[in-house]
Image: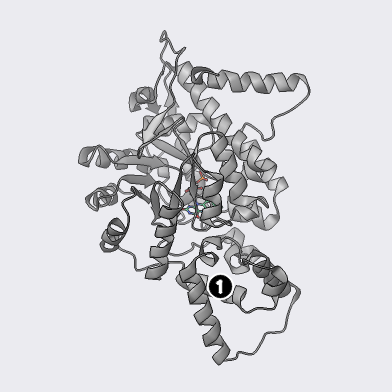
Amino acid sequence: MPLSGFGRAVQSAIFREGVFGRRPAVPTDGTRLEDAARRAMSRKGFAYVAGSAGSEATARANLAAFDRWRVVPRMLVDTSERDTGVTLFGRHHQSPLIAAPVGVLSMAHSEADLAAARGAREQGVTHVISTQASVPMEQIARELAGSGHWYQLYWSSDDELFESLVRRAEACGSETIVVTLDTAYLAWRPRDLDLGHLPFARGEGIAQYTSDPVFQRLVAERVVAAGEQPRPRPRPTPAGVGTLLSMSRNHPGNTRANLASPVPRAAVETFLDVFPRPTLTWDDLPRLRALTSLPIVLKGVLHPDDARRAIDAGVDGVYVSNHGGRQVDRSVAALEALPAVVEAVRSREASVRVIFDSGIRCGADVFVALCLGADVVGVGRPLAYGLSLAGSAGVSEVLRNLRAEVDLMMALTGCTSLSDLTEDRLVQVGGPSA
Ligand SMILES: Cc1cc2nc3c(=O)[nH]c(=O)nc-3n(C[C@H](O)[C@H](O)[C@H](O)COP(=O)(O)O)c2cc1C
């Protein structure tokens, strides 16, 4: 199938299936996708994925920011041949999409990151492996063999662990290191707080840690130290037993043996100690630059001055994101921050790439973000929703639909390549702060 006909081909395939009474595995509309996922997921799982910081004003602002831009289609352009491809960090991407790093996918589907990776690979979309994944990075990388992947790093407070994670990412073939800057602490997230639920405390989403030799050593040291200072055991409650089961199931090895072992609980406690590095500053970046020759992308940049500092620190990409509104309540919408960051980057170092996420729900959102200067955009929550509904097929369909919609948007607006997507294709309504 020629790439130029991708959007039409997907449309036709859906309608042909419809003749036989078959419907798409996942809704093609972002709102209906979320509604369907709400029904499919557990209460705690949906709260974790859909929830945001505080009043969730940032998450709403992320979506509303797109509504302030309107596309101005151009006519009488031959768009029969279209190219949605982009080359980034040495790899050609068929579409301007990446699968944003999303942790704890076990909350959405039992096959978690493995299914997500398969779905992304099927669509030729680069998968970003999360430090909070439910599956060790080496296994996810095997699933992605040949199709390329990036590794998202949470910079641990333990130096050796930080180095070990980077080394493992290199060894399993990750092509770029994405350092997430906006999560020095977990934000105040009322949906999770009201359910008293933190997946990590149940041993979920810490597979990169429990599979790491440095982390395993830290856990072993903790177990020995705890053995020397016996603590009174709290009386078991049903919820406590559930947590113990969850920790034991999620820990590597035999669940029954884990239930009798102090290690899974020590692993959770160790993780909670080493997860954030609140002392991280610009002065730390040279250590990462010296550690790896892979391209480095900083995720969570919202201010043009931070973009300039990132470039001065020698990074290869700036990732404009507010973590889908999950970290700072009443933050600037990511899309509102994008033009100034792009301007700062382009005027400082044109070769530095700009990645964007937070609020991408449809092809027109992708189109607008690219017109405002992003090189590629990350798809976050919709992937988790597709995963919850139909496993890898659901992830693949979400990405396929976005690719198809972007392609049709280009066809209908007089664009034949991504270089045509420029700011003069848009008008802003209601002013920047409407
Ligand atoms: C459930 C969930 C888990 C996430 N986990 C991570 C993570 O481990 N690392 C990271 O850098 N970003 C993480 N993010 C943020 C995403 O990479 C992305 O920035 C965000 O989903 C974009 O917002 P949107 O999904 O509303 O478009 C997570 C987001 C969600 C929804």
x and y percentages locating residue 14 in the rendered image: 67, 23
Nearest the eye: 161 or 365:
161
Whether residue 101 is visible: yes
Type of amino acid at the residue the image marks with label 1: Ala
Write the residue at 58% across / 50% down: 113
Q: Is 169 displayed left or right of 269 in the figure?
A: left
Write the residue at 58% across / 65% down: 200
Q: Is residue 159 above or below residue 233?
A: above
Q: Residues within 10 Å of mark 1 (few under 14, many from 20)?
A: many
Q: Is residue 422 above or below residue 399?
A: above
Outermost residue, top direction? Answer: 76
x and y percentages locating residue 387 in the rendered image: 64, 44
Q: How is the image coloured?
A: one colour
Screen quadrant of the N terminus:
top right
Write the residue at 47% across / 17% down: 411
x and y percentages locating residue 423 in the rendered image: 34, 28
Nearest the eye: 343 or 310:
310
Q: Is 246 displayed left or right of 50 in the figure?
A: right
Look at the numbered disc 1 and say if its residue's Cβ is closer than 8 Å to ligand 1: no
Screen quadrant of the C terminus:
top left
Q: Which residue is mark 1?
A: 267
